[in-house]
Image (cartoon, rainbow, N blue to C red):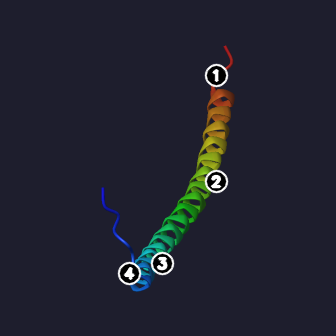
C-alpha cells in the first residue's frame, strides 16, 4: 500500500471546492425554507376560508331547519 502525499495547494483547492459547494447548498436550503414559509402562509389562509365556509354552512342549515313547517 502506498500513501499519496497531499500537497498544501491540493488541500487548499479541495477546501475551496468544499466551501463553494457549501455556499450553493446554503442557497438551496434558504430557497426551500422560503418556499416552506410561503406554503405555511397559504395553508393558514386556506384554513381561514374553511372556517368561514363551515360558519356559512351552519347558518344556512339553521335557516333551513327554522323554515321547515312545524308539523
Q: Which mark is residue 36?
A: none
Q: Is residue 23 left or right of residue 70?
A: left
Q: CA distance from mark 4 to mark 1?
A: 90 Å
Q: Which mark is residue 10?
A: 4
Q: Which residue is mark 2?
A: 48
**SS under mark 1:** loop
Mark 4 vs mark 3: in front: 4
Task: Spot the residue most to the front.
Answer: 1
**SS under mark 4:** helix
**Crowd rating for badge 3 (residues with CA inside 10 Å; few <14, some 14–19, many 20+):** few
**SS under mark 2:** helix
Mark 4 vs mark 1: in front: 4
Question: Is tag 4's residue or tag 1's residue first in the polypeptide sequence?
Answer: 4
Looking at the image, which residue is at 65% across and 27% down? 65
Asked whether the beta carbons under mark 1 and mark 3 sit within 8 Å of each other, the answer is no
Q: CA distance from mark 1 to mark 3?
A: 77 Å
Amino acid at each position: 500500500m502506498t500513501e499519496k502525499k497531499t500537497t498544501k495547494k491540493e488541500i487548499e483547492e479541495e477546501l475551496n471546492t468544499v466551501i463553494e459547494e457549501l455556499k450553493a447548498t446554503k442557497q438551496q436550503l434558504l430557497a426551500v425554507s422560503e418556499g416552506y414559509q410561503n406554503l405555511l402562509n397559504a395553508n393558514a389562509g386556506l384554513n381561514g376560508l374553511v372556517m368561514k365556509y363551515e360558519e356559512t354552512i351552519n347558518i344556512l342549515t339553521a335557516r333551513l331547519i327554522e323554515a321547515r313547517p312545524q308539523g
